[in-house]
Amino acid sequence: MSTPFNLNPIGEPWPSVRTPWPDRSAPLYGPAFAQDPSAYYDSLRRAFGPIAPVALEETGAFRGYLVLDHAHQLEILQNQDRVWTRDSRWYRDLSDGVLPLDHPLIPQFAYRRSRLYAEGGEHARLSGPGNKALAELDLLGTRDLIADLADQLIAGFFTGGEPRETCEVDLLGQYALQLPLLVMMRLMGMDEHSALATGNALHEMLSGGPGAQRAAEELDGRMRALVAQKRDDPGPDLVSWMHHHNQEAGLDLDELSEDVWLQIVAGRGASTTWICNTVLELLTNPALHKELASAICSMDEAMNHVMWINAPIQNLIGRWATRATTLGGYHLNVGDMAIISLGASGADPAMRSAGTSVSRTNKAHLAWGAGEHGCPARDLGSLIVRTGLECLWERLPGMQLAVPQERLVWDLPYIARSPSSLPVTIPSPPTDVLADVRNGQQQQWTRQHTFVSSPPRPTSTEAREQPSERQGRLPLWRSLVAWWPRR
């Protein structure tokens, strides 16, 4: 994506643009959208119908057709007519210079040699080892790992200073951001030193500061080092199983590294926001809270309800038309972009009027995607979120929102939606948590969990590469859980 190109990704000249960008479009940004996206989607539906031309930032250069209607969303995701692609090289606005090559949002969808941007046989080849490795997971053992990490994070709420009658915690920064990432790094077989460095680099990259590009390059290097290490010294982890299942697919080191990176970070935003938004809904919806407490509603049902009324991922950006097509009355050119608005599905008036009894049990939402690019880790993702929430509810009775709901500041939800922080108060910290901390009973990162067995030993006779990082563990797990709050 370094220079404009005159040929499309299959080497043919781009066809002429038949239909110009609509004269009337809407902004998908601004305070009204950030504060109440459901109402905003309703206004777009009234103004435009099931499809709305939108700009995602002030210049109008980053633009696409927002798909508000569930039926059209499913049609695009299933892609039975092979019209749509995830390959961002088909983005015509980038080729034509409408979207400047130095636009700051380009890194979020820039093409990489990854399953995320592949189709057909290439998608199957790139995703095969990772999907087969995920199938090796023992979910019962994995739940023990998640609960162990969750309990350690909760214990960290009460470290330092004298016990107080109440404790205030930013549940987003001190729990929801950390847990999914730590679980995935542990499943991938990282030692504590590498996990610390990876977490710091990830934080720096996502902060968008001057060191973001350097941090991204560091993360690429760390993924390559991890994949190389596990190739030569496999263990009971997902990366080692990916190597084992790669014998037929024949992915090279870069391709395997891309898939490891994708698996670590893909669920971070969704799982983090899902935890955060479910906690918020339970703390501000007395009826749902009561139903959960009385076992009328399960945690799974509460999570499903949130998928409809406050979707963790609001919009899936990046489906491009590979041939001229029509969409909701609009004529689209080759290379036009469609944006799947998952948040708008729950904002549909028919869904809103159905009530919680439907939103708790209706699993027709498209949060996991559909078709070839449907999420392969939905069981693992649900398990991380459900276990994290159950640990919170069991260990922290009496948790309450620390500020009025209307005072929460929301991040711009053009992809994910969550508050910038979620402050909660916890009255009378649980004595068992305090006892664990005082007695120094923190678990270590290297504690053994039987979430996956060891694959067969490698048959390669190549000389082993030395790991690029010092191996082994740091003295205590506490050093790892302490890193993230400085976000």
Image: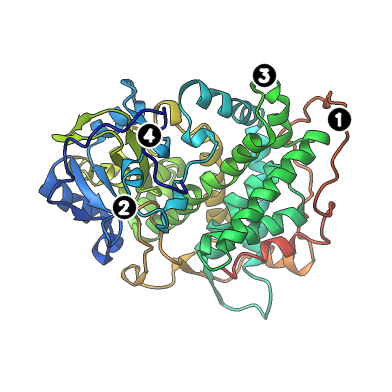
Residue 462: numbered disc: 1
- What kind of element bears circle 1? loop
The residue beneath circle 4 is: 7
Task: Identify which residue, 275 or 35, lies in the foreground.
Answer: 35
Q: Where residue 82 appears, x then y in whole percent?
A: 34, 23
Q: Residue at x 36, y 55 (%)?
A: 100
The residue beneath circle 2 is: 62
Q: What amino acid does circle 2 point to?
A: Phe
The residue beneath circle 3 is: 248
Marks 2,1: beta carbons within 8 A: no
- What kind of element bears circle 3? helix
Which of the two discs, 3 and 2, labels the residue nearer the N terminus?
Answer: 2
Q: How many marks?
A: 4
Task: Identify which residue, 249 or 200, lies in the foreground.
Answer: 249
Position of 221 compared to 25: left or right? right
Position of 210 compared to 415: left or right? right
Which of the two discs, 2 and 4, labels the residue nearer the N terminus?
Answer: 4
Bin the neighbour count of mark 2 within 10 Å (Cα to Cα): few under 14, some 14-19, many 20 and up: some
Position of 137 compared to 476: left or right? left
- What kind of element bears circle 2? loop
Q: Where residue 370 appears, x then y in whole percent?
A: 39, 30
Q: What amino acid does circle 3 point to?
A: Glu
Bin the neighbour count of mark 1 within 10 Å (Cα to Cα): few under 14, some 14-19, many 20 and up: few
Q: Residue at x 46, y 67 (%)?
A: 421
Label 3, label 1: how many angstroms apart (C-alpha)?
19 Å
